Amino acid sequence: MPGFTALQFGTSLERLETSPQVNPPERSDSDLLIHRDSIFRHTGWKSDRLRVYEALKRTGAGIDRIWNFTQCGHGAFVLRNPDNPTEYRICGECCHDRFCLPCANTRSHIIAANVLAQLRGKQARFITLTLHSTTEPLADLLRKLGKCFTRLRSHSLWRKTCYGGVAFIEVKWKPDLNRWNVHLHCLALGKYLKQGLLSQLWFKVTGTSPIVDVRFVHNEQSVARYVTKYASKPLDHSVLHEPDRLDEAIRALKGKRLCTTFGNWRGVKLSAAPDTAAWEYVDTLASIINRALAGEPQAQAIAKALGIPSVFPLPPEKPPPKPRPLLFQVHCGEQFNLAPQPLSGRPLQWI
């Protein structure tokens, strides 16, 4: 048969065989996480990023998720505002993983901007709902918190005072108590809500937790800080340094919504990113950095506008790691390529 060699045929009694020629040379984990054009994006959390990467591998995360996580920020480029030529932005393909700190920070700023747009001219309150815990697994606590919040929203007191809003889940680990601490932080539109009544209702709903907090929103700046804080950190920093706890958190948070709208905010797209179509392409971020280091004035001005330090340490130039496709030879002679999908199908995002 044309197109096939004798080596590609087999019988059903033969084992599946992996082609030995397709595996690229071995590279260290630190090499997988560093590119010249993405180091600026991930410099501030290099050590924690490696911890998350190792945890994703330990917990059996999919090959596409791990690959996208390692390639986050690679291929970034610089855009210029045509209406203000001195204003620049970094844009590119990002992993959008909830445990990627730069992606979480970007997402939190987008959510904060969209929340502020919904809040203009309206009264809102910060509401914190705690959940008492002992030695329960994190997955059980998250499940209980979701059910209790659903029951709370169905009560007449909540419906009369909270018309709609957004809620954020915060997860902490208490090493001194050896237990998880899960909170629900809400930004709700509505009327005055007496903290004592909410405390009684929340205790009735949960059976264990009377501690709540209600505060009136005085200005938009406090709203932006509040939303940015809780939308950008699915996990407390202490969890990242506990491998067992980090693994448990990754498993428990899989498929969980950490930011959800309720009431008349249902359907509001808080994560809708700004449109970049009107901005002009300048150059790749790697090229801008290299030109700035070479002393080119224009590139140095762009780097300064972007906040890139004048002395910026870069790793040696290396090609990006190749995907590790798994090619199986089966008895029918066909080959199935199980390589991870590239990032090119994802929407562009501010970096």
Image: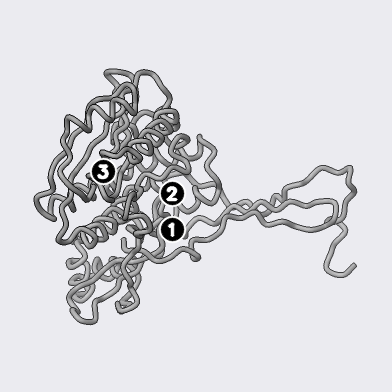
Q: Nearer the viewer, mark 1 or mark 3?
A: 3
From the image, state whether disc 2 or disc 3 is nearer to you. 3
The local secondary structure at tag 1 comes to loop
Q: Residue at x 31, y 68 (%)?
A: 274
Find residue 332 and report its horizontal and vertical position in percent: 85, 55
Is residue 35 rendered to the left or right of residue 157?
right
Q: Which residue is mark 3?
A: 186
**Residue 194 location in percent, x, y?**
16, 36
Does the residue at mark 1 contact the one at mark 3 (Cβ under 8 Å)? no
Label 3: element kind:
strand
Q: Residue at x 43, y 33 (%)?
A: 143
Q: Position of residue 24 (x, y in %)?
A: 59, 52
Is 155 or 178 nearer to us in this picture?
155
Q: CA distance from mark 1 to mark 2?
A: 9 Å
Q: Which mark is residue 146?
A: none
Which residue is at 14% across, 41% downward? Answer: 215
* Nearer-the-camera pick, 252 or 31: 252
Q: Amino acid at mark 1?
A: Lys
Q: In the drawing, what numbered circle is on residue 31?
A: 2
Q: Are marks 1 and 2 in contact (CB under 8 Å)?
A: yes
From the viewer's perspective, is residue 338 above or below residue 177?
below
Can residue 47 be seen here? Answer: no
Q: Residues within 10 Å of mark 2 (few under 14, many from 20)?
A: some
Q: Secondary structure at mark 2?
A: helix
Q: What is the crowding at mark 3: few (fewer than 14 residues within 10 Å), some, or many (at least 20)?
A: many
Q: Is residue 124 visible?
A: yes
Which quadrant is home to the C terminus? bottom left
Q: Amino acid at mark 3?
A: Cys
Residue at 37% across, 44% down: 258
Residue 231 to residue 84: above or below: above
